[in-house]
Image (cartoon, rainbow, N blue to C red):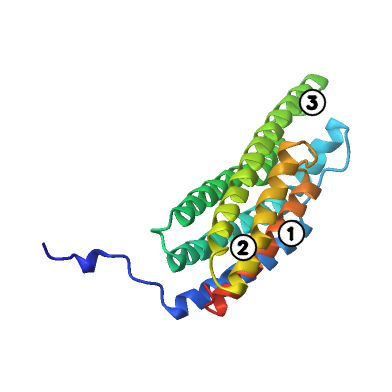
Amino acid sequence: MPEHTARNTPAPTDTSTRNAGIVVITATLLEIAGMAHHPTVTTPDIAQAVAQITRLSGLSAWVHGGLIGLMLAILYAYTEFSRRRGLARPLIRAGLVAYTTGIFAMIIAATMSGFVVGQLASLTPHATVEDLQINAQLLILCHVLNQSFASLATILMSAGILFWSLDLLRDSTPARLAGICGCAIGLLPALALLTGSLHLDVHGMTLVVVVQSLWNIAVGVLLIRKLV
């Protein structure tokens, strides 16, 4: 039987590999900058909190919308990384599935914080005590959903990083060093989250982003230098 070579996925070129490295590094640095501008509610009083959320809703939407775009850019770079490594490898496929699922879970979490909460505070009445009680309950629900999806995303993205890192351990010295670093980065946030020592408030989420940025930059350098 003839081989259907035309149907095979084309190998990534050096240009696409280099571009993917530039994308992952650039998007990672912008993601850190975006987290630094993440708006935060600074009061436990529900009336003041609703007022702050309403006032900051525009900024929150821009920040979270930008972060969602950057997450998708990073995911694009990792699809190129996975093609470069070879999708026939089980660890590469497992890493891509886990990381992609984690990205979309994180997008849901960001949508809750950046868009749903702001719209809720803007559109619901909060003139009476009863209104404020309902607002408080709705905000608690949004917080639970945000934290649930953010936790799931962190664990899945960490698993993806771990799978990819294990694959790198059998490669050249620079790739092995990145793999060793990635194993630690893949394990530590997930373990900290599962043991309750990490909470995904703004500070905790920023810490996760910064830690994972080390892996992103390492992979970006490998891609730019075509070492994977």
Looking at the image, which is closer to me, 64 or 159? 159
Mark 2, other Cα within 10 Å: few <14 / some 14–19 / many ≥20 = many
CB-based contact (under 8 Å), mark 2 and mark 3? no
- Cα–Cα span, label 2 and label 3: 50 Å
Say if 192 sits above or below 130 in the image. Answer: below
Mark 1, other Cα within 10 Å: few <14 / some 14–19 / many ≥20 = some
Which residue is at a point 57% across and 62% down the rendered structure image?
Answer: 74
Q: Position of residue 178 (x, y in %)?
A: 64, 66
| Residue 169 at least partly seen | yes
Label 1 or label 3, whichever comes before in sequence order = 3
Q: Which residue is mark 2?
A: 179
Q: Secondary structure at mark 2?
A: helix
Q: Position of residue 206 (x, y in %)?
A: 76, 53
What label does residue 218 carry, if any? none
- Cα–Cα span, label 2 and label 1: 17 Å
Q: What's the residue type where badge 3 is placed?
A: Leu
Image quadrant in which you'd find residue 48: top right
Q: Secondary structure at mark 3?
A: helix
Q: Which residue is mark 1?
A: 210
Outermost residue toward the top in this view: 130
Say if 37 sits above or below 117 in the image. Answer: below
Q: What's the residue type where badge 1 is placed?
A: Val
Q: Which residue is mark 3?
A: 132
Label 2 or label 1, whichever comes before in sequence order = 2
Looking at the image, which is closer to me, 191 or 198? 191
